[in-house]
Image: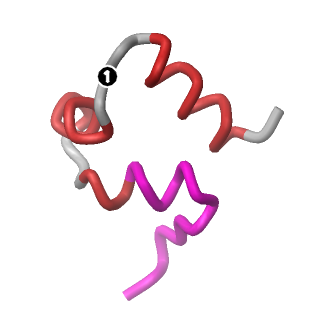
Amino acid sequence: MAKNIILKVARTKSELSQQQLADTVTITRQTISDIERRDYNPYKT
């Protein structure tokens, strides 16, 4: 299973919104969204 799917499944099983997860791990909600959509690039400027 792809890591982005694992993240989304774990987040939804924990009943966390993207914003709640982002706040917990101190990143932006947009980063969570990008990871879940497989559009995340840590080197993107």
What is the magenta range?
32-45
Q: Main secondary structure of the magenta part?
A: loop
* Quadrant where the C terminus is found in the figure: bottom left
Across and down, in percent, residue 40 comes to 53, 65
Q: Which residue is mark 1?
A: 16
- Mark 1 neighbour density, 10 Å: few (under 14) some (14–19) many (20 or more): some
Pick whichever, 15 or 40, lies toward us.
Answer: 15
Q: Is residue 40 toward the left or the right of residue 26 in the image?
A: right
Secondary structure under badge 1?
A: loop
Q: Is residue 7 toward the left or the right of residue 5 in the image?
A: left
Q: Residue at x 65, y 29 (%)?
A: 6
**1 shown above or below 30:** above
Residue 23 sits in quarter: top left
Q: Residue at x 45, y 24 (%)?
A: 11
**13 shown above or below 8:** above
* Quadrant where the N terminus is found in the figure: top right
**42 shown above or below 8:** below
Across and down, in percent, residue 19 comes to 22, 40
Across and down, in percent, residue 3 comes to 69, 39
Q: Is residue 6 toward the left or the right of residue 12 in the image?
A: right
Q: Amino acid at mark 1?
A: Leu
> Which residue is the extreme one toward the right?
1
> Which residue is the extreme one toward the bottom?
45
> Which residue is the extreme one toward the top?
14
